[in-house]
Amino acid sequence: MSKTDDLLKKTHDLILKNKFKEAITACDLILKLNKKSFQANLNKANLLAEIGLHKRSLHYYDKALKIIPDEPLAMFNLATTLYDLDRHDEAIRMFDKVIKIRPKDVDAICNKANTLVALGRHKQAMSNYDKALKITPKDIVILNNKGIVFAGESKHKEAINCFDAALRIDPVDMDTLCNKGNSLAELGDFDEAAACFESVLEIDSADYDACFRLGVAYANTNRPKEAILCFNKVLKKDPTHTDALTNKGIAYIALKKYMHSISSFEKALRIDRHNVDAMYHKSQSLAELEDSKSAILLLRKIAKREKMGHDHHYHNHHKEHQSLREKICQDAHFSKLKGDKIFLSFMRTLH
């Protein structure tokens, strides 16, 4: 075995052990012996990309492809690196070169589709996902990618069809179950969404994102006590999870435990003092406790942020986006303030 071959083997062994910097050093030793070593140039390019030095890696991809032009693996890795650098058009051109040589290269077709999604060219992306599915019809990653694009376009029924197709192949795939649960929640079907997240937690009880989403689903199906248990598990893992704190506060409002809710909102606001959702729901609790002065003060802060350009439209799963005025007018929690002159004066300032 030559010294170069020995160093290539050493590089390979170091890569398998995730010792990337040492592997780069081995590549440099090879390139001192033979600067036209295709494998050493490609390995160094891949390793530099792996440790986040994407721009530096381009030089070595270029050198490798000058030694063996149009080598599919080198072009594919270069394309993925260009994607990481947000050079999407160049990435697509490189994926196209790979696909021209290997028309059934599913990885190249899917990565091209992902790049088209990044450019907002969803129709073309879907066409590429469909091409890939003709080659590997039972690929749940592709089915999920396709579903995620539909979900991004708010076509949640179509998204769920994709996720269901994936679940017929693997009924316990956690990513698919979560994706389906998210789309069901967007459609307002929180019972079915909860079932998806419950299935995920049966597989992995430590999936805290699924636990949080299950809490939201419980809260929207009149199960605030169960929701609070979910949010507490999330907060035990991450006490700074402001969404869990805010949603926990909302669940306490449903239980009419307004002091408990205020405590949750105040914790969220200590972490993020501009958290508009926490401010709004805290004002609900204050209104219920007939602390009109504090409730109106918080609503004024929200209104001021809107006027300054920090628009925040309130949304639930059954209505269109709402302005602050529309939200307050339809909110029963503020009914006790409707006879308050200061509150009425404030409402007249809203548009």
Image (cartoon, grey):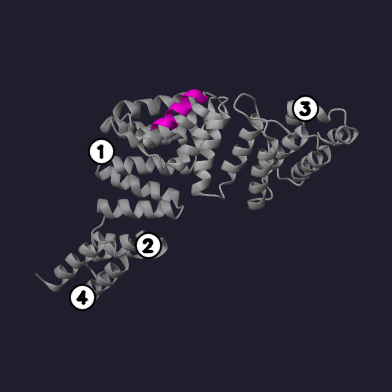
**Which residue matches tag 1?**
104
SS state under label 1:
loop
Left or right of 58? Residue 182 is right
SS state under label 4:
helix
**Which residue matches tag 4?**
33
Q: Quadrant of residue 283?
A: top right
**Which residue matches tag 2?**
51
Distance from the alpha carbon under mark 4 to that under mark 3: 77 Å
Q: Are marks 4 and 3 in contact (CB under 8 Å)?
A: no
Q: Earlier in the sequence, mark 2 or mark 3?
A: 2
- The disc at residue 329 is 3
Q: Earlier in the sequence, mark 4 or mark 2?
A: 4
Amino acid type, mark 1: Lys
Kindly report which numbered mark, 3 or 1, lies closer to the viewer in this rendering.
3
Left or right of 257? Residue 54 is left
Distance from the alpha carbon under mark 2 to that under mark 3: 54 Å
Q: Earlier in the sequence, mark 4 or mark 1?
A: 4
Q: Main secondary structure of the magenta part?
A: helix
